[in-house]
């Protein structure tokens, strides 16, 4: 599964690992029922609801996508603790090279497993990764019943505002922010 990244992006969204349907389709978050694309739009990160095949338009908006572990699986529960740790080390190296301002880890469980931060919760984190500030977002998988779509969008919007990015959707009306 190819990363959607470039140097010096504002926010790189970091999934746990690609799902098998996404890997087969060749696009990130292409599993039916995944709420990533609606969350990006409803939170103001994107000007319209992107389809998975439009993922390569994200870097022009200062956004990117990667994953902790690159091996596709049917479920993240198939990953071993060692895979998470190796994936976290690899993500740190990639981040040092690409230098995004923020890493947005999608799912507290993956963040905890990869970086050993047992008490982590959704929201900003104290320790940077590879020089990037870190924010943990809820996992956008349709299996995550703890965050319905509206609550998911609120959490994504909190990061967008903290990153100083404007509401590109026009849905929230919070206006432009200084992006310096």
Image (cartoon, grey):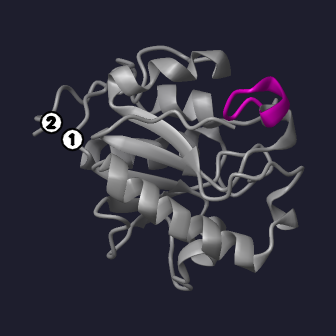
Of residue 6 and residue 63, the one placed in the foreground of this image is: 6
Which portion, as a residue range, is magenta? Answer: 23-30
Mark 1 crowd level (few <14, some 14–19, many ≥20, 10 Å Cα): some
Residue 79 occupies which quadrant of the picture?
bottom right
Q: Along the horizontal axis of the image, is 4 left or right of 161?
A: right
Residue 179, numbered label: 2
| Residue 6 screen position, x and y as percent | 38, 34
Q: Are marks 2 and 1 in contact (CB under 8 Å)?
A: yes
Of residue 11 and residue 37, the one placed in the foreground of this image is: 11
Q: Along the horizontal axis of the image, is 30 left or right of 93?
A: right
Mark 2 crowd level (few <14, some 14–19, many ≥20, 10 Å Cα): few
| Mark earlier in primary sequence (2, 1) | 1
Disc tally is 2
| Residue 20 screen position, x and y as percent | 86, 41
Residue placed at 64% from the left, 53% from the top? 139
* Residue identified by numbered label 1: 164
Residue placed at 69% from the left, 27% from the top? 27
Q: Quadrant of the N terminus?
A: top right
Answer whether residue 25 is magenta in the image.
yes
- The secondary structure that dominates the magenta segment is loop
Q: Is residue 165 above or below residue 148?
A: above
Q: Quadrant of the C terminus?
A: top left
Answer whether residue 75 is magenta in the image.
no
Q: Is residue 15 above or below residue 169?
A: below
Residue 121, numbered label: none
| Residue 165 screen position, x and y as percent | 25, 35
Residue 161 occupies which quadrant of the picture?
top left
| Residue 83 screen position, x and y as percent | 72, 70
Q: Give the SS element for disc 2.
A: loop
């Amino acid at each position: 599964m190819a990363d959607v990244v470039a140097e010096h992006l504002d926010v790189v969204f970091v999934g746990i690992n690609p799902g098998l349907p996404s890997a087969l389709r060749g696009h990130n978050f292409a599993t039916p029922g995944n709420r990533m694309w609606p969350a990006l739009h409803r939170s103001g990160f994107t000007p319209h609801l992107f389809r998975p095949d439009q993922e390569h338009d994200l870097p022009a908006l200062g956004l990117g996508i990667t994953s902790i572990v690159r091996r596709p699986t049917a479920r993240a529960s198939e990953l071993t603790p060692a895979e998470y740790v190796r994936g976290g080390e690899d993500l740190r190296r990639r981040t040092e090279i690409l230098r995004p301002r923020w890493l947005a880890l999608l799912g507290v469980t993956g963040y905890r497993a990869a970086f050993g931060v047992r008490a982590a919760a959704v929201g900003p984190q104290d320790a940077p990764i590879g020089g990037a500030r870190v924010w943990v977002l809820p996992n956008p998988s349709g299996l995550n019943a703890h965050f319905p779509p509206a609550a998911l969008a609120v959490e994504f919007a909190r990061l967008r505002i903290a990153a100083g990015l404007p509401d590109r959707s026009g849905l929230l009306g919070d206006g432009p922010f200084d992006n310096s």
